[in-house]
Amino acid sequence: MNKRTTIYLDPPLHRALRLKALETGQSISEIINDAVRQALAEDEEDIRAFEERAAEPVLSYEAVLKDLKKHGKL
């Protein structure tokens, strides 16, 4: 079941959403729901990547630069 909420959009953003809704045959709610889902999925991917790399050693910026120069990548 969908939940109703109130959001406040800048007028130019609302106009753009209305136009996109007309062009795509979607409702503004569908467009916003899709955008929020995508943003949350990206956040979830980032969190997973951080968790997977948590055990990796921490390297200083200088150490990374030194390694890149040592291997001819800089």
Image (cartoon, rainbow, N blue to C red):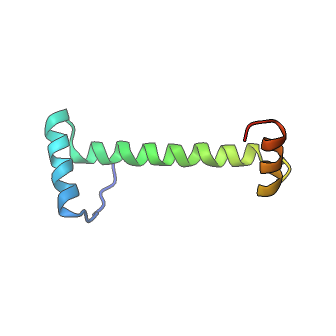
Please state which of residues 11 and 69 is positioned toward the viewer in this rendering: 69
**Relative image position of residue 54 (x, y in whole percent):** 79, 50
- Image mark count: 0
x and y, in percent, of residue 64 in the image: 79, 49
Q: Is residue 48 among the parts visible in the rendering?
A: yes
* Residue 1 visible within the image: no
Foreground residue among 69 and 29: 69
Residue at (78% x, 36% y) in the render: 72
Question: Residue at horizontal 43%, vertical 44%?
Answer: 37
Q: Is residue 62 above or below residue 53?
A: below
The vertical placement of 31 against 11, above or below, is: above
- Quadrant of image for the C terminus: top right
Between 72 and 62, the residue placed more toward the observer is: 72
**Foreground residue among 50 and 71:** 71
Point 16% across, 48% down: residue: 18
Q: What residue is rendered at 55% in x and 49% in y?
A: 43
- Horizontal placement of 47 versus 52: left or right? left
Give the x, y percent position of residue 34: 36, 42
Classify residue 25 as left or right of residue 48.
left
Q: Quadrant of residue 6?
A: bottom left
